[in-house]
Amino acid sequence: MPGNEGTTATREAPLSSAGFTQRGGGGLARILIVEDNLDLLRTMSELLSDEHEVMMTDLGETALEMAERDRPDLVMLDIQLPGIDGLETGRRLKGTLGPIPILVLSALAQNADTRHILQSGCCDAYLAKPAPLAKIRAMVEELLGSHRHA
């Protein structure tokens, strides 16, 4: 891919049907990003793929399939997804994968929305969009670190 020297990317089919994997240099962790805004999906991948293997999809259904097959170390999840929403996707991921850390990034930023998301059991942490990239990276590393030491 132009501009991604040092990374290998494979794309088997349209994003929503098969997902997309970008392998970073460090391979420290496997991160699944579930986001239907393709620009944000690309930005998150670029932010994290220098140190981690990043898997991406824009649908909850595909995320469930990819997580079962590829066993990510962390999931970044949008709430407002077509089809199965992020709340249900997160609950199903927790049921399937056990204590995997899930970071929700959502435009639903009202206090009531935030409380509802955190109380739903679908995630371990929440950031409102738009969140600074440095804050996202720090939260990812914090969640990965606490999961490794659990």
Image: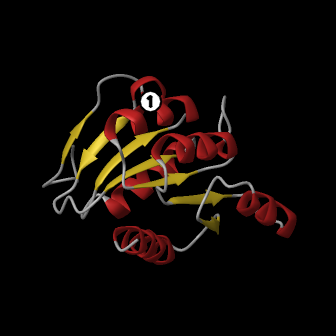
- What percent of the width, then of the height, locates residue 16? 48, 28
Whether residue 26 sits left or right of residue 116 in the image: it is: left
Residue 6, by quadrant, is bottom left
Question: x, y percentage for residue 13?
Answer: 35, 22
Colouring style: secondary structure
For badge 1, the amino acid type reads: Glu
Tell me the element at label 1: helix
User: Horizontal placement of 87 versus 116: left or right?
Assistant: left
Nearest the eye: 137 or 71: 71
> How many numbered circles are shown?
1
Q: Nearer the viewer, residue 60 or 122?
A: 122
Name the residue that disc number 1 marks. Answer: 65
Q: Quadrant of the N terminus?
A: top left
Looking at the image, which is closer to me, 89 or 77? 89
Up/down of 31 relative to 124, above or below: above
Mark 1 nearby-residue class (10 Å; few <14, some 14–19, many ≥20): some
What residue appears at the point 17 percent right and 51 percent down from the top-left corner? 7
Would you place residue 6 above or below residue 12 in this image? Answer: below
> Residue at point 32% right, 39% down?
70
Give percent across and percent down for residue 133. 47, 71
Q: Quadrant of residue 120?
A: bottom right
The extreme left residue here reads 6
> Where's the C terminus, which quadrant?
bottom left
Residue 71, x across and y down, in percent: 35, 44
**Vertical relation: 21 (above or below) 106:** above
- Asked if residue 21 lies left or right of residue 39, the reply is left
